[in-house]
Image (cartoon, rainbow, N blue to C red):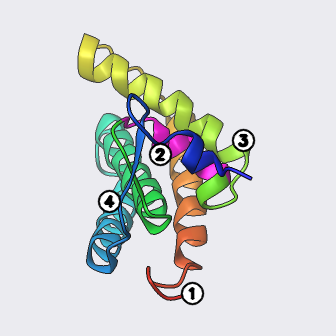
Amino acid sequence: MTSPFENLTGPGKPLRAEPPDAKEFAGLQQLGLARLKDAQTDSLALESRFDLAYNAAHALCLAALRWQGYRSGNRFMVFQLLPHTLGLGPEVWRVLSRCHDARNLGEYEGMLEVDSRLVADLILASKQVAAKLGELPPPGNP
């Protein structure tokens, strides 16, 4: 049976197989956790907190994908694959999807529209990703 990762790997597809790297995994995890911590600083502007939490989520989700032995050429793919990388359901990846759309509007059209509820949901989703990621052994160790 072909895995979801294998189905998305190959010419013209968004994933490529690449052996996991323990140093890269640890770096992405550390970066994600640091940004997640900073995103919870109430004295920062809401937009800054959103940016920190979104980038934390992306780094943590990318670490999970790299742990599986894949790299994505598509930023959004790391969120879509959460059911397969960390076993997280729609309550997490839907929040991340909504935040990805908001981030793109801000980055490409200058229209970042976030509120405190979205930032709180994003921080919660990022914490769930971080918790599941923390349960994984270092890459290369079964």
Q: Circle 2 sits in a helix, a strand or a loop, which is it?
A: helix
Q: Is residue 81 visible?
A: no
Q: Amino acid at mark 1?
A: Pro
Instruction: Answer whether labels 3 and 1 touch (C-beta < 8 Å).
Output: no
Q: Residues within 10 Å of mark 1 (few under 14, many from 20)?
A: few
Amino acid at dot 3: Pro
Dot 4 or dot 3, earlier in sequence: 4
Spatial CA span between label 1 and label 2 = 22 Å
Name the disc covering residue 35, or none.
4
Q: CA distance from mark 4 to mark 1?
A: 28 Å
Residue positioned 52% across, 55% down in the render: 126
Among the two numbered marks 4 and 1 on one chain, the one whose residue lies closer to the N terminus: 4
The magenta-colored residue range is: 74-83
The numbered disc on residue 142 is 1
Nearer the camera: disc 2 or disc 4: 2
Indicate the secondary structure of the residue bearing disc 4. Answer: helix
In the rendered structure, find residue 78 and report the number of the disc placed on it: 2
Q: Is residue 123 left or right of residue 17?
A: right
Of labels 2 and 4, earlier in sequence is 4
Q: Is residue 65 left or right of residue 46?
A: right
Q: Nearer the viewer, residue 131 or 72?
A: 72
**Does the CB distance between marks 1 and 2 fall below 8 Å?**
no
Residue 20 falls in which quadrant of the image? bottom left
Q: Main secondary structure of the magenta part?
A: helix
Q: Are marks 4 and 1 in contact (CB under 8 Å)?
A: no
